[in-house]
Image: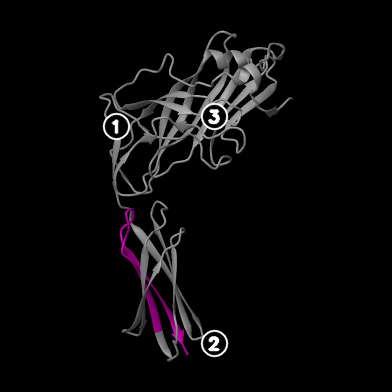
């Protein structure tokens, strides 16, 4: 089996990669659609311009921040005539000898765009001089990350940092199904990320209105721990704030130290990227039963919550 990374050069390098809507599936009630134009810069002196057509099942009208849904998705992909010819032509004619190809589109979700997990089954290449059309199927992934209104936008393909976070991959095969070259956008080298020319494109319903979801705040939990260092007379409170659907809390947590029912001191601490905050209380010496309460007021995605932990000083 011959496998090597796809390099575009010469006449083949002049061909632009185009993925687009040809004989697109009809849109039905309860479905969404979008046509997106992308650019995929390279260091090889060419800028492929993919196009994509998607038909997506409608999401629920409302969701909770952090909740994730997977929406069945179909569409079509088309490689333009010039690129299809360069890929299908035999090496003796400056091509790559692809008789068929497969493709994948994997894009992570974010608070401003939907994710994608799509595949193109092994499909025949058209003869040189013709464009190549193939179906795509898979899932469109939705995960709002804050309360309010979430618009189902399609932005860039893959992740800016490259593999393995996500990419567009085309794999070629010879007539005997021998695996040939592949093209990966982005590859961390010659091939860049495919970016949406319009910056963002909403999925639209049958009335061409952008599809939106009403998002409410998720319930949060504030898991609280307390520890005591007798040698240094320091009590430390640790709070981990998370939503039911896994979002980490952001902002501040107020830690309150009490001895019995008497409040001794309060400290505010900032949650890190994992939703964890700590606070250290110094000069804790008097014997007795102590508690540290951590109170999270809430943020754009999560409702407030609190937790309590106790420790003794002997």
- In the image, taking residue 297 as reference, residue 123 lies left or right, namely right
SS class of the residue under badge 2?
A: loop
Q: Residue at x 39, y 39 (%)?
A: 113
Q: CA distance from mark 3 to mark 1?
A: 26 Å
Q: Which residue is mark 1?
A: 210
- The x and y percentages for residue 210 are 29, 32
Ranked by sequence position, the earlier of labels 1 and 2 is: 1
Question: What residue do we see at 42% from left, 56% from top?
Answer: 248
Closer mark to the observer between disc 3 and disc 1: 1
Image quarter (top left, top right, bottom left or bottom right) of the N terminus? top right
Earlier-in-chain disc, 2 versus 3:
3
Q: Work out whether residue 170 can be spotted.
A: yes
Q: Residue at x 36, y 17 (%)?
A: 26
Mark 2: few, some, or many residues within 10 Å (few <14, many ≥20)?
few
Task: Specify the principal SS of the magenta part.
Answer: strand
Q: Is residue 265 above or below residue 78?
A: below
Q: Position of residue 272 (x, y in %)?
A: 45, 62
The residue under label 2 is 231
Depth check, front residue: 304 or 95: 95
Instruction: Give the distance between the C-alpha atoms of the residues marked 2 and 3, in whole angstroms.
Output: 58 Å
Q: CA distance from mark 1 to mark 2?
A: 62 Å
Which residues are the magenta region?
Answer: 290-314
Location of residue 86 with respect to 195 vertically, above or below: above
Does 136 appear in magenta? no
Q: Position of residue 285 (x, y in %)?
A: 45, 90
Which residue has dot 3 on it?
104
């Amino acid at each position: 089996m011959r496998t090597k990374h796809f390099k575009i050069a010469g006449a083949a390098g002049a061909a632009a990669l185009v993925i687009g809507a040809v004989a697109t599936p009809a849109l039905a009630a309860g479905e969404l659609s979008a046509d997106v134009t992308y650019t995929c810069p390279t260091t090889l002196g060419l800028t492929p311009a993919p196009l994509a057509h998607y038909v997506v099942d409608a999401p629920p009208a409302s969701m909770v921040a952090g909740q994730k849904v997977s929406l069945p998705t179909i569409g079509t992909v088309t490689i333009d005539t010039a690129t299809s010819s360069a890929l299908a032509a035999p090496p003796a004619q400056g091509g790559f000898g692809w008789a068929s190809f497969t493709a994948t589109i994997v894009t992570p979700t974010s608070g401003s765009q939907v994710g994608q997990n799509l595949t193109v089954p092994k499909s025949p290449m058209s003869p040189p001089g013709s464009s190549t059309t193939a179906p795509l199927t898979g899932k469109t992934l939705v995960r709002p990350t804050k309360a309010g209104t979430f618009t189902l936008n399609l932005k860039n393909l893959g992740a800016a940092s490259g593999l393995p976070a996500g990419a567009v991959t085309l794999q070629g095969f010879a007539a005997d199904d021998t695996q040939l070259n592949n093209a990966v956008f982005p590859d961390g080298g010659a091939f860049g990320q495919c970016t949406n020319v319009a910056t963002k494109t909403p999925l639209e319903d049958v009335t061409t209105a952008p599809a939106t979801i009403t998002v409410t705040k998720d319930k949060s939990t504030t898991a609280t721990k307390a520890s005591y260092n007798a040698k240094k007379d320091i009590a430390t409170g640790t709070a981990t704030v998370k939503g039911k659907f896994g979002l980490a809390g952001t902002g501040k947590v107020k830690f309150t130290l009490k001895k019995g029912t008497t409040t001794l001191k309060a400290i505010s601490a900032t949650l890190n990227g994992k939703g964890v905050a700590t606070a250290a209380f110094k000069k804790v010496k008097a014997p007795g039963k102590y508690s540290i309460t951590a109170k999270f007021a809430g943020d754009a995605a999560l409702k407030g919550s609190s937790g309590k932990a106790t420790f003794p000083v002997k």
